[in-house]
């Protein structure tokens, strides 16, 4: 028999469920904005250069200015949400991202466009870690939280699938400025829904702003990102490169030393005593090292060796994007049933196997692998990425007390950013060093095989870390 109290509680339960779904949609909008922006700007580079009379180096900074600003504030963005309220910082990030996109869309010259890209990058650095922290707060139950973060992570795959297609159509039909205008209605909707559905949080008034830590972290991350971005352009011996490496080399130990001294600063080192949390950082960096190297090199391979256009190359990568999206939808339940160790180990192993299979295809077949065969191989890294991304994010935010969720979200996203930056730089350099050594029908340069092999080995190393250090109960929220 159903009691009157159960009948009375049913509408309240349904209201909570509806509110949670609305918050999940809002946070997913934030991810979509940032990732679609990243994936479509590459397609507009040629038109931007023609319209604004920009040089090749200036066009490179259209992309790199965003990445540099994003890297600089990413670690601070989540911690500021812990201090001043996550909804407040998420809304600030959305507003900055919209402002930067509007500046880009209206830019009369390349300088204005670069400033707009910096503003958008700062907005993304504040918005993304707080979106993850808000989801962790909204879903306190381990299974529900894993499912929600899986959907959130899957939006990366949706953006990679939709971005090149939508971007190509917009650039061809309405011009390059339309890709930035696309962001504005999404930002308006995300801001309105966040104000309506996301509850305000008080922050942590007992904690103080770690300004020295913020400055040192920003300096270290900015210098590292700048050095990696400029390495292929200037080489390691240029004065500006030496200065960037010196700043990173000095600021990083200074930051760690300051965190040891102050105890409860921007990045409390006590968090790393949790083995699962520390392992999640390593796994996230290993994941993006191999995958972002692949995402960087694959379009070049498809266009140079298979003769595809930019739009056709994006469509050829759909098996990876769509498999990532589909698996992410269900990985939360799978991780809850099997444990995060199993899903993360399997995911990292599949990404490693996919990259090694591509390396084999380049080396053993002499680059004669048909396009359909290459697209089939892309299912392996796509499924692996779906199995790992949601759980590694869930483990990171579940392994810390609730009041440090934003800090954990910032750290895991920083680990992903560092891995991605190094992966593009290192694997790109390996491919470039052997670019002229071609063989086979399609003439895959030998550098692709070496780069894919290196990325695959890093992924498999991450799988070993997951099987060794991730605890089965790592999705259970740590007490305050």
Image (tube, grey):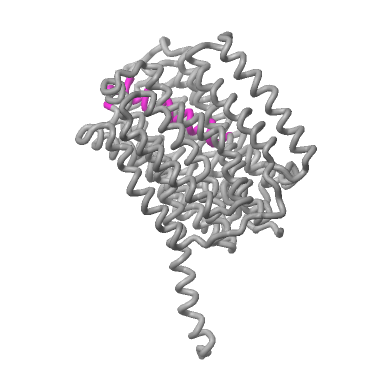
Give residue 169's quadrant in the image.
top left
Q: Main secondary structure of the magenta part?
A: helix
Residue bounds of the magenta highlight: 286-309
- Residue 102 magenta-highlighted: no
Measuring from the top left, give residue 34's x and y in whole percent: 43, 41
- Residue 301 magenta-highlighted: yes
Could you tell whether 453 is left or right of 301 in the image? right
Look at 27% across and 34% down and name the residue there: 168
The answer to whether residue 114 is above or below residue 207 is above
The answer to whether residue 8 is above or below residue 429 is below
Can see residue 473?
A: no
Measuring from the top left, give residue 258's x and y in whole percent: 75, 35
Measuring from the top left, give residue 225's x and y in whole percent: 55, 26
Measuring from the top left, give residue 439's x and y in whole percent: 38, 13
Can see residue 113?
A: yes
Look at 68% across and 28% down and name the residue there: 252
Which residue is nearer to you in this view: 249 or 54?
Answer: 54
Q: Residue lying furthest right in this view?
A: 261
Could you tell whether 402 is left or right of 173 in the image? right
Quadrant containing the C terminus is: bottom right
Number of numbered discs overlaid on the protein picture: 0
Look at 54% across and 87% down and name the residue there: 5
Q: Residue lying furthest left in this view?
A: 173
């Amino acid at each position: 028999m159903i009691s009157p109290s159960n009948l009375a509680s049913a509408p309240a339960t349904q209201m909570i469920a509806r509110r949670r779904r609305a918050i999940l949609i809002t946070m997913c909008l934030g991810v979509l904005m940032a990732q679609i922006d990243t994936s479509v700007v590459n397609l507009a580079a040629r038109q931007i250069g023609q319209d604004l009379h920009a040089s090749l180096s200036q066009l490179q900074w259209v992309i790199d200015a965003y990445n540099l600003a994003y890297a600089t504030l990413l670690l601070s963005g989540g911690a500021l949400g812990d201090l001043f309220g996550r909804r407040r910082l998420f809304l600030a990030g959305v507003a900055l991202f919209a402002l930067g996109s509007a500046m880009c869309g209206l830019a009369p010259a390349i300088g204005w466009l670069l400033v707009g890209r910096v503003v958008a990058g700062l907005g993304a650095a504040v918005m993304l870690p707080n979106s993850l922290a808000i989801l962790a707060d909204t879903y306190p139950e381990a299974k529900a939280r894993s499912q929600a973060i899986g959907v959130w992570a899957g939006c990366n795959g949706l953006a990679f699938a939709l971005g090149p297609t939508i971007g190509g159509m917009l650039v061809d039909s309405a011009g390059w400025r339309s890709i930035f205008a696309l962001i504005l209605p999404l930002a308006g909707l995300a801001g309105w829904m966040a104000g309506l559905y996301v509850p305000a949080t008080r922050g942590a008034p007992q904690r103080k702003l770690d300004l020295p830590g913020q400055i040192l972290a920003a300096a270290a991350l900015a210098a590292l990102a700048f050095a990696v971005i400029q390495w292929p352009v200037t080489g390691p011996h240029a004065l500006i490169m030496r200065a960037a490496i010196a700043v990173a080399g000095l600021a990083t130990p200074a930051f760690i030393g300051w965190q040891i001294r102050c105890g409860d600063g921007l990045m409390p080192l006590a968090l790393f005593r949790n083995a699962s949390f520390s392992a999640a950082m390593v796994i996230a960096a290993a994941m993006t090292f191999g995958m972002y190297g692949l995402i960087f090199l694959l379009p070049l391979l498809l266009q140079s060796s298979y003769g595809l256009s930019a739009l056709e190359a994006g469509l050829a990568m759909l098996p990876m994007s769509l498999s990532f999206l589909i698996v992410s939808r269900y990985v939360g339940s799978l991780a809850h049933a099997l444990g995060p160790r199993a899903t993360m180990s399997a995911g990292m192993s599949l990404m490693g196997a996919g990259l090694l299979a591509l390396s084999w295809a380049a080396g053993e077949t002499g680059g004669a692998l048909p396009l359909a065969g290459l697209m089939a191989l892309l299912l392996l890294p796509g499924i692996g990425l779906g199995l790992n991304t949601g759980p590694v994010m869930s483990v990171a935010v579940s392994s810390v007390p609730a009041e440090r969720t934003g800090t954990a979200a910032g750290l895991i996203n920083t680990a992903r950013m560092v891995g991605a930056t190094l992966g593009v730089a290192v694997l790109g350099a390996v491919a470039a060093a052997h670019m002229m050594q071609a063989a086979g029908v399609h003439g895959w340069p030998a550098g692709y095989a070496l780069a894919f092999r290196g990325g695959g080995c890093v992924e498999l190393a991450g799988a070993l870390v997951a099987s060794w250090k991730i605890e089965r109960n790592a999705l259970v929220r740590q007490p305050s």
